[in-house]
Image (spheres, helix red, strand yellow):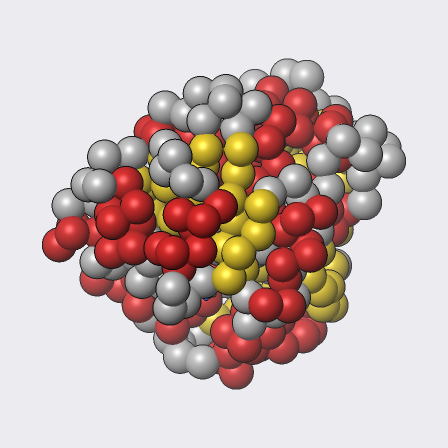
Amino acid sequence: MGAGHPPVHRGGAVVRAVVLSRFGGPEELRVGEVDRPEPGPGQVLLRVRAAGVNPFDAKVRSGAMEAAFTTPLPAVLGSEVAGVVEEVGPGVTGTSVGDEVFGWADSGSYAERAVATTVARKPGGLPWERAAALPVAVETTDRVFGLLGVRPGETLLVHGAAGGVGSIAVQLGVRAGLRVIGTAGPGNQEHVAALGATPTTYGEGLVDRVRALAPDGVDAVFDVAGKGALPASIELRGGTDRIVTIADDAAAELGVVFTGGPPQRSPERLAEVADLAAKGELVITVAGTFPLVDAAEAHRALAGGHGPGKLVLVV
Ligand SMILES: NC(=O)c1ccc[n+]([C@@H]2O[C@H](COP(=O)([O-])OP(=O)(O)OC[C@H]3O[C@@H](n4cnc5c(N)ncnc54)[C@H](OP(=O)(O)O)[C@@H]3O)[C@@H](O)[C@H]2O)c1
């Protein structure tokens, strides 16, 4: 997942893409030409308008994921896409040329064209970059809420509430009837409060701050950030039950559930959440947009601690 078609030239049409030719820093992301992907059975070919930039992409870029799975190089990164359907492959129903859609790219989305199987119709009023910021956050939140078994009226603690995933998780939690306490840096407290959570800062003293906000305890913990908050979470919960992390490597050692998938990709659910956003009932925060040629800059921003929400490439 996340790294797409190897840009081997077959002599046909080519498109511009951000090509990773060797693992390393952001500077390894260079614009080049790759074969235009062909839509296979069940796939649509998209003229890409926006591509979500995920920390996962940076982990693949650096080579850190090679121990878990290999990415053949050269590769095109990017799993989130929004764009216009340019061709439909065999067996595609319900999606036509010219439709504006968003979802998960099967080939890398850091490119002018990408193929995709799981896409939803983009509401007309939803900007491209916001649509491209949604798929990973929605799928991950739903998967984790399912694992946590959260119920209306419960208190959920979210670590990393201001980021690409956290900003959506907070709002879906509030909509599900949860009281959400969200941790974020000092500069993002207002952002987290505006999303409907009770904000607090992470770091030393976290247990005491959360206890002061939730004297009856927290019912569940969603660790989005993966920055060492599991011991504090265990202390707050009195054990490892109902704590899930998506990013902390210490999970296994501490006996905490780590989920990395399998992804449960639902176009219907994506459409539902996008409609909420189009109606102004859910906020999709874009931390910054970058043109395709500045993909390396986007990855530097990702590493440097960007503003609240998601970074997106616009094509
Ligand atoms: N396993 C999966 O299925 C899955 C799926 C999606 C994402 N992920 C992973 O989840 C992580 C977050 O993804 P994302 O897209 O939300 O990233 P992101 O947009 O970069 O957000 C990360 C957030 O972490 C916060 N943070 C930094 N240091 C922290 C600390 N010590 N304690 C608490 N929060 C801290 C930052 O908050 P401030 O800016 O307020 O400091 C930032 O908002 C990444 O590692 C990503 O790879 C995993």
> In the image, residue 133 lies at what x, y percent?
64, 48
87 up-or-down from 158: above or below: above
Q: Would you say residue 70 is visible in this rendering?
A: no
Residue 153 in the image, given as x and y percentages of width and height: 50, 22
Tag count: 0
Q: Position of residue 79 (x, y in %)?
A: 52, 49
Does residue 177 sit above or below 245 in this rendering? above
Report which quarter residue 170 is drawn in: top right
Is 231 located above or below residue 93 in the figure?
below
Residue 242 sits in which quadrant? top left
From the top left corner, tell me how far across and down residue 1 is, in percent: 41, 47
Report the side of 232 relative to 169 (left or right): left
Asked whether, in this view, residue 197 is left or right of residue 313, the answer is left
Q: Nearer the viewer, residue 59 or 99?
A: 59
In percent of the image, x 42 and y 30: which residue is there?
145
From this view, report whether residue 255 is shown above or below residue 150.
below
Comparing 115 with 203, the one in front is 203
For the residue pair 240 and 68, the one nearer the viewer reads as 240
Q: Which residue is pictured at 66% across the width and 29% down the height? A: 273
Q: Residue furthest right?
A: 125
Q: Quadrant of the C terminus?
A: bottom right
- Most foreground residue, 113 or 219: 219
Mark yes or no: residue 17 visible: yes
Q: Residue at x 59, y 68 (%)?
A: 186
Residue at image position (67%, 74%) is 294
